[in-house]
Amino acid sequence: MLVKEVNVNIRNAINHGGVVFKVADGGSPVIEFISSEKGQSVVLSLNVYEFDNLISKIYDAASGVLLGICHFLNSSIKMVSVDRTEKTFLSFSLFGMELSIPTIRCKSISGIPDNKLLNLDFYIVNSDRTFLMQTAIEIAMIAYSRFDDYQQYMVSFSNERLQTSWIRFNNQDIKDMITRQKELSDVVTDVISRKDCLIWDASTEEIDLQEVKYFRFPNYSGENFKINRVEEASIPDRKRLKAHLFIGNITDKNEILAVINKAIEWMKTLKNAPSPTLPHKHGAMGADSLYVNVYRADSRKNKELYPSNDNFVCFIDYNIDGITTLKHGGIFESLWRQFHHEKIENMFIAWREGKYAIKRNTINIGRNDLCPCGSEKKYKKCCLGKEK
C-alpha cells in the first residue's frame, strides 16, 4: 500500500530532465514525463490536476510512514532510550544535537580515555574572536554540567574561511566560572597565558570557493618515470609544492638526475589554487620551491624516508634562488643526518646511498658557509669530511 502510488518512470523523468509542460489549443495543461524503460522511450501524460492528486497521495503515504514510526517509538520508548550520561558515541551524538543551532553546529564530540580530555568540534558562522571565546566558554560550561570529570575541555571552531581555532579549559577553570570563584575575564587571561588558546583571523581574500572545492593537481606519467601525490605546501610569500617521483630501476646517477630535472621542470609549471583559510602565494607563476621524494616503485607501502627503505632513492629540495626554506627536509634531524648530502645547482639532494654523493659537488663550499644539508650549521661543524 505504501508504494502503490509511486511511479518509477515519473521519478526518473524528473531526475533526468525529461519533463515537458504543454498547453494544447483550447485544451487543459498537460505534463509529459519522458523516461526510458528496458531500452525503450516511455512517455506518460498527466493532466495537471492528476499530477496534483498523485503528489497528495504520496504525501499521505509519507505522513503515514512517519506517523507509524512515531507511534512505534512512543510505545517502545524503553527500547530506544539512551543514558545520556554514558560516554558513548550515541550519547555524544545526541549531546551534539542539543548543543547545535543553525549558525553553530556541533560536528563531533569525542573523549580521550581516562577522562583526560573532551573534544567538542563545531562549525560556526561568526568568526569574530570575542564571539568565539564567549561561545567556547558557554559550550564548556554546558559540557561540564553533563560530564564533569574530564581533566580538560577543548572547544574548536572552523568554517569555510576560518582555519581550525581552539580554546582549551581545564576542569578547575570551568568550576571557578560556574561557582564565580573567578571572573570570566580572569579565566580567559589564564587560558591565554598558558597558551591554551589558538584563534586564527578568518581569511578575507577574494577567492572563488568553487574553484578551491573542485581543484585537483594533475599526475604525470612519462616513458621512464611518473609523478603523483602533488600537494600544496605554499606560504604567503613563497609558492611551494611537494610530490612523489617514481623512477623504476634506473641506477645510473646521471640518468636519475636527468629524470629529476624533467620532473622539476614539469612541476614548476603547475598552477596552484588559493587557500580559503590561510592566504598563500598561488597562481600560474613558477614555483619557488619544490620538495620531491624519489622512489623506485609506486607500491602501497615503502614510502618512508628511512635509510633502511630500499625503495627510497633520495629527497630533492629545489629552490629557485638556491636558498632552502625547509629545515632537515621536514623530518627528524637524527634521520636527516644519516643521508648523504650534496648540492647540485639549485637542488639540495639527500641520497639514501652514499655511492651517489660525489665529493666534487661539495668541494667548493666554504668551511664557514652554511652546510648544504640544511642543518643551519657551518659546513666545518656539520658535514665536512663525511664525503670521504
Image: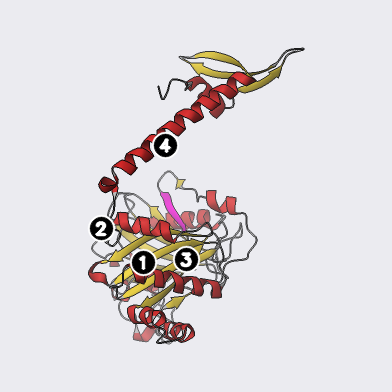
Cα distance between the residues tagged 3 and 2: 42 Å
Cα distance between the residues tagged 1 and 4: 34 Å
Which is nearer the eye, 74 or 118? Answer: 74
Mark 1 or mark 3: whose residue is earlier in sequence: 1
Foreground: disc 1 or disc 4: 4
Which is nearer the eye, 382 or 217? Answer: 217
Which mark, by number, is residue 44? none
Say what secondary structure mark 1 lies in: strand
Q: Position of residue 158 (x, y in %)?
A: 49, 63
- The residue carrying mark 4 is 66
> Residue at the location (46% across, 48% down)?
219
Tell me if mark 3 has few (under 14), some (14-19) or many (20+) residues whose alpha carbon lies within 10 angstroms of its own: many
Contact? badges 1 and 4 (CB < 8 Å): no
- The residue carrying mark 2 is 310
Q: Position of residue 203 (x, y in %)?
A: 58, 66
Q: Which residues are magenta?
A: 226-231
Q: Is residue 362 magenta?
A: no
Question: Does residue 251 appear left or right of residue 291 in this picture?
Answer: left
- The residue carrying mark 3 is 157
Cα distance between the residues tagged 3 and 4: 35 Å
Q: Amino acid at mark 1?
A: Asn
Q: Quadrant of the N terminus?
A: top left
Q: Amino acid at mark 2?
A: Asp
- The residue carrying mark 1 is 119
Cα distance between the residues tagged 2 and 4: 61 Å
Tell me if mark 4 has few (under 14), some (14-19) or many (20+) residues whose alpha carbon lies within 10 angstroms of its own: few
Question: Does residue 218 appear left or right of residue 295 in this picture?
Answer: right
